[in-house]
Amino acid sequence: MQLILEKRAQASRLMHFASPLLAITLTVLLGGVVFAAMGQPPLTALYIYFIDPLTNLWSIEEVLVKAAPLVLIGVGLSVTFRANVWNIGAEGQLTAGAILGAIIPIFFAEWQSPLAFVAMLALGMLGGALLAAIPAFLKIRFGVNEILTSLMLVYIAQLLLDWLVRGPWKDPHGYNFPKSVAFDGWHLIPMFGDGRVHLGLIIALVTALILYWVMHRTIKGFEVRVIGNAPRAGAFAGFSQTKMVWFCFLLSGGLAGLAGIIEVAGPIGQLQPNISPNYGFTAIIVAFLGRLNPIGVIFAGLLLAISYIGGEGVQIELGISDKTAQVFQGMLLFFILMCDTLIHYRVRLLKAKGGAQ
Amino acid sequence: MSSTSSVENSPQVLLEVRALTKKFGDFAANQSIDLVLEAGKTHALLGENGAGKSTLVKMIYGALQPTAGSIIWQGQELKIDNPAAARELGIGMVFQHFSLFEALTVAENISLALPPQLRTHDLEERIATLSKDYGLPLNPHALVADLSVGERQRIEIVRCLLQEPRLLIMDEPTAVLTPQEADALFATLNRLTQEGCAVLYISHRLEEVKQLCHDATILRHGEVVAQLDPQEETASTLAQHMVGSSVHEVRRHDSHEAGEVLLQLLNLKQASDTPFGVDLIDINLQVRSGEIVAIAGVAGNGQGELFAAISGEQTNKDFDAVIIQDVSCGQLGINGRRQLDTAFVPEERNGHGAVGDFSLTENILLSRHAVTDGDVPVHKGWAGINQAELSRINSHVAQTYDVRSASVDAEAGSLSGGNLQKFVVGRELDRQPKVLVINQPTWGVDAGAAALIRQALIDLSRQGSAILVISQDLDEIFELADRIAVISRGQLSEAHAASEMTREEIGLLMSGAHEKPTNTASEGGH
């Protein structure tokens, strides 16, 4: 008996949508095994991890706060990956956006107006786009693999931020803590009611809707899909591969930078060495789980946000390391890539031919 | 599948292939092939692209498993499970496209591909002596990145020779060589056969087959059509066997009025940007209103590069290299050229002319998003795509050119080859372009669809359009063309009236009779 993968004549529509659900199921099952192996009651742990965050208003708000940057970065990446361009460095672009956007509150603290807030967001996008332009340029000019360069730039951006908040940008009245001055007034993102949910969530949702429309209703989205699917057909259509690399990196970098400035102007309220629990990397999972479709990314972003809150939950209630969240995210990406095989292949049991010839 | 008979092989026979058949689904790539290879002889395997040469060779080398038939090696029937098993038997193969690591040295590359017991410490010495012995000088310490294409091929050959093969398979070895390099290779092969090695030599360069080979097997449509002694043939009789001797009665069209020149190539030069591409050398051609000019040639002689240069997928620094309707457009991209009322159909329909995963209406958009042709535009900037207009064009194409699909807007990839080709051709003809460039209009298409496409091309030309057809199918060329030119190694012969050309003449031109000696031939590979 032999288990073989057989190519389907046509990609399976059903599996296209079933694959993420299957991956989530497998992640939950294996997660239960992991909890059991750690000596925890698996059902209780899974309940705390996945269900508990949705049972009270406080944690639902917290899920939405975490979903905002994931969706914002994830939609940019979903377009980029569609075009077969691999920006893995959104975490660095997020950092670069936070740094550049923070110039306004740190150096122009007196400039208090809605315009100052808009300028912060614009600078944030610019910062992310500038950092993303480096791997784009290197790929086009020298053929350097963008996966490596974009990834390595993450650490450069993070170390730059670290140096800034420990050095030149440190709050002089901050008791020597590695933090910038606390942002104030129009330099903070508008909040809703008295909770923690902020304007960033609306920006993320609107961006997702716009990009959905661009991808499915405009020639630009068509261009992205053609180049990603069949580069030679892209050349035949007269689309430029080079321009597409620029477009993807500037778009996804800009959105990651926007997410970065929103984080520091929102939930954090100042620059500090750590501004993101790996949103930029988790957004890669969000993009794939959302089928590289901006609407799908909204749901995937919510799910991954739950995994953050759930990770904190099991840490508090069961004393398990909060690295659990990363384990779950890793399993999820692994399973989704695995299950995606089933879109183009079916599994078949083959009875071995008996007897020697 | 009976394997009972014990054969009285003459001691000379090294490998015998009997009734070998390979089917991919319903398609028989090889149908009942018989082949005998004798030690000490060079056997040519001839045929056009798609004739089944690669399939046959892959079965002998263990890379494919036959559907039926048997392979007999030194009198013993056996199954060759994989290339490693073939090498174990003493079968070596030099592929047309090399698999070498550019950043490693010659010795390192060879060592990587050898079985562990041959990776000895004196490997570098053995490479040096062996390569010198066989007239294939190689420096074992040289980096592959620094070597010419010919030298890279030597690495592959030396790699095979180190394993002391009894049979060496060469897949179009001279396709990438300069004439001088080719001569050196022939000397090596002659020496090998004198030592008792058998060589299976795949080529479609007829002159060199005559020069080198003792026997020849000619394949067409997956079947053996002739087994003969190349010494007793001329290049043109060989060509006739390859392209099919069943000469159709050519249907001449009404005498046409060739009008003004609509498409002109002026000293078109283009260096290939890939190591295995073909450089275009000084190509001159005029296509006039109302005529069909066909470019014949064996695959891989620059047809793809020529198409890219004319269509603008590959632009040219020289403005005048391509002139369409009096506009010099060397530097103009493909959409700029389309706007000059010109249309293009590439050879590969799936993945080049169309995207298989996309719907038919999306595939209409693919080549028509930049041209309006007086109709409603199919899209308008950021305002989005005009789905209604796309659907209208799609159903019009489907009706006019008899495109049959499961639903009106099916995925392109779900259409049969013939229907997708009718769609791709129809999508362009629907614009009634003044200039049409089409590469392999009926490649792999059933007879009915082929007839429909050819008729449509003739009709368009008689309405005053200029049409350039690139084809490897001589029957098709004689059916369509008013004038014929032949491309060989990136050089284009002069175009002559079809009525004055014979298959023999075309066969000779295909094998390079018109080529000017050139020093640039080896420059493409770097």
Image (cartoon, rainbow, N blue to C red):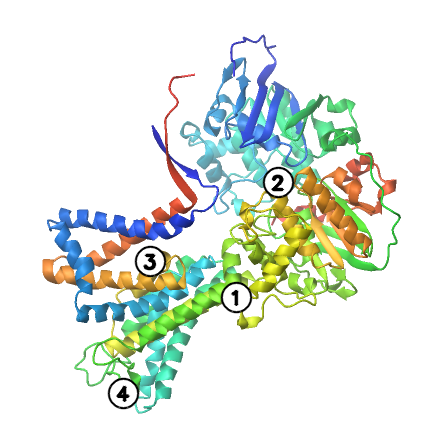
Residue indicated by mark 2: B150
Inter-mark Cα distance, 3 to 1: 24 Å
Residue indicated by mark 3: A285
Residue indicated by mark 4: A185
Inter-mark Cα distance, 4 to 1: 38 Å
Camera-side mark, 3 or 2: 3
Element type where label 4 sits in the image:
helix
Marks 3/4 in contact by CB < 8 Å: the verdict is: no
Element type where label 2 sits in the image:
helix
Residue A115 percent location from the top left of the image: 38, 87
Chain letter of disc 3? Answer: A
Inter-mark Cα distance, 2 to 1: 44 Å
Residue A102 percent location from the top left of the image: 32, 80
Residue indicated by mark 1: A220
Residue type, numbered disc 2: Gly
Say above or below: A224 vs B94: below
The image quarter containing residue B230 is top right
